[in-house]
Amino acid sequence: MPVATLLPFTATPNRKSVSPTSFRLTEKFILLLVFSAFITLCFGAIFFLPDSSKLLSGVFFRSAPAESDPRPGTDGDFAGATGRDEKILAKIRKDHEKALLEAKDTLQKRAEEIKQDIKSEKEKVARDGQGRGGGGKDDTLPEIEYVRPPGATGHDPSDPDAKEKRAKIKEMMQFAWDNYKHYAWGSNELRPVSKQGHSSNLFGSLKGATIVDALDTLYIMEMYDEFEAATEWVEKNLDFNMNAEISVFEVNIRFVGGLLSAYYLSGKEVCKYVICKLNRSWHNGSGSIVCVCSLYSGIGRNWPWASGGSSILAEYGTLHLEFMHLSRLSGKPVFAEKVMNIRKVLNRLDKPQGLYPNYLNPNSGQWGQHHVSVGGLGDSFYEYLLKAWLMSDKRDEEGKKLYYDALKAIETNLIRKSSGGLTYIAEWKGGLLEHKMGHLTCFAGGMIALGADGAPDDKTGHQMELAAEIARTCHESYARTNLKLGPEAFRFDGGVEAIATRQNEKYFILRPEVIETYMYMWRFTHDPKYRQWGWEAVQALEQHCRVEGGYSGVRDVYASSPNHDDVQQSFYLAETLKYLYLLFSDDDHLSFEHWVFNTEAHPLPVIKRESADRSNQL
Ligand code: DMJ
């Protein structure tokens, strides 16, 4: 190319002498040439690029093996690959059209028909899921003759005052139940102010927590029509065949405990059957002690907030009672073995000052943070040691020893008396005491009273006194509020005693623990103050928690009037109302000789020595 031709593109002094018109024409022509050459190059390059549809098909469309060409030697063959891609695209198009048609069909269906379709689909999944925790043939249970343990049904109290009060408590149960049924039937819980269903993530996608939790209370209170309706719902709707994550602890204490109780009280086989279906997935699982479990695969994990993903003492330590009964009913020792293994792990560990920290790392097998509590995160572990011994008709000597040793360590390290003379159970954080007691911790009065009779070293009297002092402290925590209901936690520091000082500890969510302790104390002492204190609680519940659509918790027990939290917890029906009812019943109704209450107040029968020897079980 002559140099002159390039001149316009080089900044030379000569440039000014070139005519502007001829310059623009040449420039345009050359630009056009370069541009078209570039386009041709790009277009050609497309043919050298890898086949993008082949790359993406692995990411977005996982083609099923059936879709790939099985013939040898066709890989990399352009025509073959194109054909395969076309096939995939055709299938996607077909699936799309099918989905659109189905959606159109569904839209034209009535709600009832859609429900029926979902039901059939679930049944199909259940059939296909045989042996995977899904139910089916595998779930057949051994024939066990049902014998109703004594005291399942009560009678009118001989004392007319108790009779009248008990009738009032039954009316409260009727009101709570009717409202749940009316506004939230099938949901986990009721929102009594907004009058609708409510669910917390504790239950995963399981449904009907209130129904299952309330079954035995309905039976105990002789509300048989309601009990029938509830068991019918269980039979038709309670569904464990789902790929859902659940809290092992909550499902065990509420669903398994509730169904076991309903079975032992009524003899209804359906209750027994669904329990074993649920527990198949736990049985199939990894067996490590974790808090959250997938119902379908049995695969577990821990709560991410728990000291680096630790397992929680009260969660893995609150399976014993239910799992012993599961082994008994299913004829499979695996459930009992699992809970005994948990004991073995704990036995091997050193306990700081004889105490059990709330967190245990399941990978290292070592304690997590050294935080000890007889309230939240620790409570029912201690309760189940004692009750394991009692439920075994006092054969589980290991459970007994572990309980009394733990109680001794708790007394030495956590139990203190305030300057005003109130005995309380503090929390322990890395060796330092936090002078705070939770509402949950108030259950300990009842537990200590229940264990006092078997206390070693002549400690029975001492333990009964301790239980009575804790009951008094917990009563004070109610008495020192405006609404006469107890705060979630109360403190003994900064110049206060048995009073909540932090705003986030002032709520009351219909919890049972204080009333539970009154019930145990009444049974062991017949001191009328326990019935009186229970009746005070009834009046406060009626005045401040009863709303048009059921019973609600309150946000601040020190406020002059209640601000409702709009939740009727399932444990209100399972525990609070049941313990109140039993507080005003005669002692032979679910007597402690024949029954042990799980931590959700579901009564389980003591496995009597003779029956255990006869059936050679447990
Ligand atoms: C219940 O679910 C059980 O009592 C559990 O052990 C702890 N707390 C709630 C009620 O407060």
Image: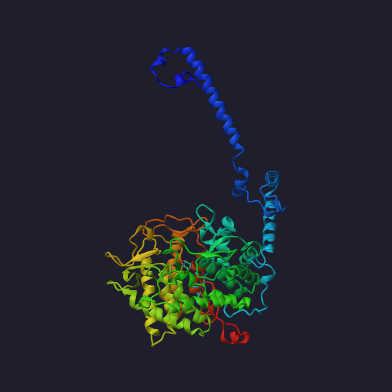
* Outermost front residue: 2
Can residue 571 be seen in this snapshot?
A: yes
Q: Residue at x 40, y 19 (%)?
A: 12
Residue 561 relative to residue 616: left or right: left
Spot occupied by residue 444 in the image (x, y as percentages of width and height): 42, 74
Q: How many marks?
A: 0
Name the foreground residue: 592 vs 541: 592
Question: What residue do we see at 46% from left, 18% from top?
Answer: 4
Left-right relation of 420 to 155? left
Q: How is the image coloured?
A: rainbow
Relative side of 459 to 607, left or right: left
Image: 206 above or below 474: above
Q: Quadrant of residue 227?
A: bottom right
Q: Residue at x 54, y 75 (%)?
A: 338
Q: Is residue 198 above or below residue 133?
A: above
Report whether 262 appears left or right of 292: right
* Image location of residue 491, percent across then percent down: 33, 66
Residue 606 picture location, percent across and down: 55, 80
In front of the other: 555 or 484: 555
The x and y percentages for residue 615 are 62, 84
Position of the C terminus by quadrant? bottom right
* Observer-nearest of 309 and 446: 309
Does residue 154 appear in this view? no
Residue at the right extreme?
A: 71
